[in-house]
Every structure is written in structure tokens, then in C-alpha cells.
Amino acid sequence: MKRTMTTADNMTKTIAIIGGGPAGLAAAEILSKTQHAVTVYDAMPTIGRKFLLAGKSGLNLTHAEPYDTFASRFGAANDRLRPALDAFSPKDVRRWAEGLGVETFVGSSGRVFPKAMKASPLLRAWRQRLETRGVTIQTRWRWVGFSDSANDHDLVFETPEGIRTIASHATVLALGGASWPRLGSDARWVPMLEAQGIAVAPFRPANCGFDVAWSEEFAARFAGAPVKSVVATSQDGRTQDGRTQDGRTQDGRTQGEFVITRHGIEGSLVYAHSAALRDRLEAEGQADFVLDLLPGRSLEALTSALEMAPRKASFSNRLRKAARIDGAKLALLREVIRNADRLPANDLASVLKMLPIPLVRPRPIEEAISSAGGISSGAIDPSGMLRHMPGVFVAGEMVDWEAPTGGYLLTACFATGRHAASGLLRWMSGAD
Ligand SMILES: Cc1cc2nc3c(=O)[nH]c(=O)nc-3n(C[C@H](O)[C@H](O)[C@H](O)COP(=O)(O)OP(=O)(O)OC[C@H]3O[C@@H](n4cnc5c(N)ncnc54)[C@H](O)[C@@H]3O)c2cc1C
């Protein structure tokens, strides 16, 4: 086994950042302003693969809602993430992107995107900035653990040239969560940290679709069909906590759309409710995605329209004429409420206003946009350092927090990467 020592004088220390995603690169950016020798290691042939994939759907960088609302989107982690977000807020994200030559705009839902609606120009400019400032980017280096040597911070990598051990004065781990493992974030680091006594909460899908036990006929005919302009509520009829953000109606419920898939349901409206639905499935073994198919009509108005529809008309004609329900919405109603055509007008109106789609399970984590779980908050001090491992800092989605879609994930990854790097500098200077 070959051990690589980087030359470093008293002033210049060697810093390893493992993981070249948004969190790792954000840490590198802070550290690149110092005299230290900074290297970003990544297991993949190229950095930022998940960031580039996020760009395929427009790259929602952050959100323009009032900052206090923004900072309340992280559930149990709100307080913990707040200092990092305060230091790199959504406004800072926009200024930073613009500093890299990427102009942003606020979409109708308040979500912020680059004007080019993609990630590659931003990643290219970011990488160039880091390399110009002397950061080394070392790809195809997979971190496989800490060495058994006396030096706590020796890091062992599998590289194309064999096993290498690197002596690092301080390290930022930014290895990502567990979704889309083929892009690099495969969570193979979990046993390595657990072996060091670090508590890691099990990874679970977040911002995910769900399986529904569709009939064969329904799945074959409607897989791929969008269901638009509906409102999702929780089982008891209230919108699920502050996790929703798009298309809020005046009473706080969430209007949006989703897609019927071969296996179940996917799409932004489902993701907005997915954490609560996943938690309820885990806790109670069952959960319904409850839909108002006609958010613009009151229950009373709908009931009287259905009562007035000609008795002789077929069920589908009655629904089309009285409620403008047809296509995928009509099929969904029939799939979920098998005797819908025999219901009296008031009951039919009720199910149109609160259609409960029974969920079986979340889709696998490999397909989820993000993951919940990761390094437990108790294992990390306020500066982002592992309490059991002085000099080792953690950031990004590998830490146990979750957030809905809406730019919250990327903003928190940037912010925690920068926060960990600042904590590392204070620690190295002996200030912490
Ligand atoms: C389809 C999709 C769309 C998304 N769209 C958005 C969006 O629009 N807005 C938003 O806010 N968020 C979005 N996200 C989420 C966002 O991309 C992630 O939250 C973010 O990339 C996480 O950043 P990270 O740096 O923590 O981890 P990652 O981006 O996962 O980076 C981790 C890096 O660590 C490397 N690594 C892992 N293990 C090792 C190892 N042992 N040794 C060396 N390197 C290792 C990986 O190769 C990877 O490069 C999207 C995600 C997906 C899947």
C-alpha cells in the first residue's frame, strides 16, 4: 500500500474534500480562498453528476418565498440548518450563480432557476473558478475508509493505480444520500462511519412516487397520463404541514398535478406530500393520497349539478356534463371507487371532492429525488464536525435532514458545504 504525503509547510495544510457534488464543491469554494492545499476526491469519472441530472428538469436552485418561510421547510432540522442557511441564504445563492455568469429568474411558483434552465454552464464555471484558485479535482478515487495507522486522518482510496493512503490535516465528507446511486451517491460509506461509532439513521426515499395496486386494465391504459389541476390533502382533509409550496390556494391547500404510472403515481404534487405519506405508511401500514378532483367547485354546488343531470344519461355523460370530469380523472374515480356509478349525487360529489387513492409503498430509493436519513444530528457538532472524529466535517445530503422539492435541497447542500468548510478553518486555527 502506497502512502502519499503532500508537502505542506507550517502554514499550508492538506485538506481533503470527499465528494464532488454541490456540498463538496461549496466547501471547496470557501477553502480555495485560503493558502491550504485543497483536493476534491470523487469516485466517479466526473464530478457533479446528480447536479447535472437536476439540470435536466430546469435546475431549481432555490426559492424566492420570504426567508423565514424558506428556512422552515426542513422539518425537524429547521433549527440545526438555520445558521448555515443564514450565512448562505436564497438571495446569496442567486448572487453566487450570477457571479459565475449564470443569470437566474423567479418562476411563477416562486422557484428560482438559471435562465438557461440547465446545470452544465454553472458547473463548468464553478469548476473553473475552483481550479483557477488551486483546488485539485481528483476523479475515479473512491474513498474506502480511514487507515489503521496512528494518524486519525489518513484516508484510504481505491484508485485506478491501486490503493492509496492520503494524509490529510482535516477532511470534509460530502458523499451524498442514497437516491440515484448510479450517479455516485451509493451510501457505501455508511458502514465505514458506523465502524467509527458514528450514528447513521437508515436512508429512506424522499420526494418519491408511490406504488398503487392498479388493475391491469387501468395501468395498461392510463400509465403516463397526467392528472392536472387537482388539490391533494391528507387523509383527514387538511393539507399536510408546511411541506407544500406550489400553487397554494387561499385556504392553504396545494393545487398541482401528478402522473399515473404503471406502478402508481409520480410527480410534483405527490412529492409535495411524500414525506408525510411515507411516514404514515411506516407508522400505520396504510395511507391514502386524497384528491379533490374539482377544486373550483364547492361540495354543495357539485351535488346539485349532479342531481340535476339527466337521469337517463350514462354515468360518464352525467359526469362530463355536470362536473366536466372525463378521461384520466373519470378512470381514476372508477378505479378507486368501484361502485361510483351507483352512488347518490351527494356521495358522488363527496368522493369527487375527496378521492382517497390507497398507497402500497414508496417507490424504491434508487428512483427518489432525494433521501431522508443519514448521519444523525447528535453525531455532529454545531460547526459540522463529527463529535467522535475531530477534524472530520460533514455536509450535504449525507446528513439526516430532508426537504421538499423547490430548491431547498440544493440551497441546503451549498449552505452546509460552506458551513462545514468555515467550521474546519476555525478548528484548524484553534478557535473552536
Ligand atoms: C432527478 C433529480 C432532480 C433533482 N432536482 C433538484 C432541483 O431541481 N433542485 C434541488 O434543490 N435539488 C434537486 N435534486 C436534489 C439534489 O441534486 C441533491 O440534493 C444534491 O445533489 C445533493 O448534493 P450532495 O453534494 O450532498 O451529494 P451528491 O450530489 O449526491 O454528490 C455526492 C458525491 O460524492 C461522491 N461519492 C460518494 N461516495 C464516494 C466515495 N466513497 N468516494 C468518493 N466519492 C464519493 C459521488 O460520486 C458524488 O459525486 C434533484 C435530484 C435528482 C435525483
Image (cartoon, helix red, strand yellow):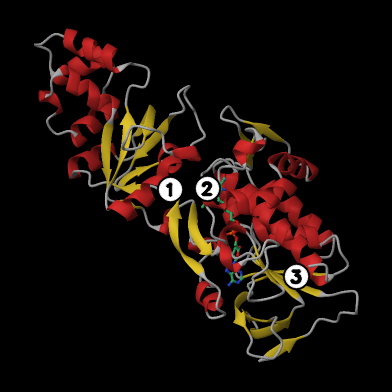
Q: Quadrant of the C terminus?
A: bottom right
The reply, left or right, for residue 226 in relation to residue 189 is left
Look at mark 3 in the image and give the residue it sits on.
39
Identified at 68% across, 52% down, the residue is 414
x then y, percent, for residue 343 = 13, 23
**Point 51% across, 68% down: residue:** 200
Query: Is residue 307 visible in this depiction of the protein?
Result: yes
Whole-percent x and y of residue 415? 69, 52
Give the amino acid at mark 1: Ala
The answer to whether the residues at label 2 and label 1 have Cβ atoms under 8 Å apart is yes
The quadrant where residue 173 appears: bottom right
Q: Position of residue 281 (x, y in %)?
A: 32, 51
Contact check, label 3 and label 1, Cβ < 8 Å: no
Asked whether the viewer can see residue 44, the reply is no
Marks 3 and 1, Cα distance to the nearest angstrom? Answer: 36 Å
Tag 3 secondary structure: strand
Q: Nearer the viewer, residue 246 or 140?
A: 246
Residue 191 location in percent, x, y? 50, 76
The amino acid type of the residue labelled 3 equals: Thr
Q: Which residue is mark 1?
A: 275
Inter-mark Cα distance, 2 to 1 = 10 Å
Q: CA distance from mark 3 to mark 2?
A: 33 Å
Mark 2 — residue?
Answer: 75
Q: Tell me the quadrant of ligand 1.
A: bottom right
Q: Earlier in the sequence, mark 3 or mark 1?
A: 3
Residue type beneath disc 2 = Gly
